[in-house]
Amino acid sequence: MTAPEPIRQTPPAPVGRSPLYRDDWEYIAKTDLLQFTRAEYATLRAQRTVYDAERQAASALALLTAGEHEPTFGYQINNYQHCLQAATMLHADGYDEETIVVGLLHDVGFLACPDRHGAFAAELVGGYVSDENYWMLRHHQAFATFAAADDDEPDREFPWHRWRDHPSATWAHTFVRHYDQNAIDPSYGNRPLEFFEPMVRRIFSRSPKPLRLDS
Ligand SMILES: [Fe+2]
Ligand SMILES: [Fe+2]
């Protein structure tokens, strides 16, 4: 990519420093990472470790609660309640904590990233969950069926056969069929977000798997 011509005008007023997370922490008072010393990087790493551990879960939950009062485009409950309902149903059926959290966050990106929301959720939690749950999140939107019940010959088959031989396909199909497409019921008693928050914190407190970029 070619660099654009710089805009040589009077710049806006300085943005100023953001507050430090803790009063006894240090700013690295340089404006270019290439100037940081080893000692400064060590300071940054130490502070970041604490920051990530204490802030990541809250930030992920804030993405979900951003839609708490959003109106819907037609379903009887909004995306926030749908996510709570999926998690509540998984909990009621005795699923493990990781899977409950995966259910809670499976549509966390639906409002801001609707067409790729499966990948959005998969990358959000991918470092902390099983390969099976990662794959399910990434693919779940392709496992849904929108076949109309009053079609003359409705195709009730869920469109998952393309991945039939994949080891995670059965779980993705199960999730979508039993904890997603039917989790839109206003008469169902959702557990509140507070019920799931400790679970979310525990999942994000796991050591993340390394990121593998293949292209
Ligand atoms: Fe979804
Ligand atoms: Fe969903």
Image (cartoon, rainbow, N blue to C red):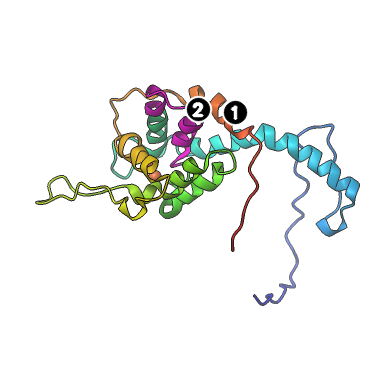
Lateral position of residue 34 relative to residue 202, left or right? right
Mark 2: give few (<14), some (14-19) or many (20+) Cα within 10 Å.
some
Q: Nearer the viewer, residue 96 or 57?
A: 96
Mark identifier at residue 25? none
Q: Residue at x 9, y 51 (%)?
A: 152
Depicted 10 relative to depicted 119: above or below: below
Query: Which quadrant of the view contains residue 75?
Result: top left
Report the magenta residues as a range.
Answer: 88-107
Lateral position of residue 14 relative to residue 106, left or right: right
Q: Is residue 21 left or right of residue 83?
A: right
Q: Percent from the top left, x then y, of residue 111?
A: 44, 47
Does 89 sit left or right of 67 as displayed? left
Helix, strand or loop for disc 2: helix
* Residue at 35% over, 34% down: 179
Q: Which residue is mark 2?
A: 97
* Quarter location, residue 184: top left
- Whether pointer 1 and pointer 2 mark residues with C-beta atoms closer than 8 Å, the reply is yes
- The answer to whether any part of residue 71 appears in the image is no
Residue 85, how many percent across, how many down? 37, 30
Tell me: is circle 2 under 8 Å from ligand 2. Answer: no
Which of the two discs, 1 and 2, labels the residue nearer the N terminus?
2
Q: Quadrant of residue 104?
A: top left
Identify the amino acid type marked 1. Arg
- Magenta stretch contains residue 113: no
Q: Is residue 153 above or below residue 22?
A: below
Q: Quadrant of the N terminus?
A: bottom right
Instruction: Report x, y in % for residue 198.
Output: 56, 24
For label 1, the residue is 202
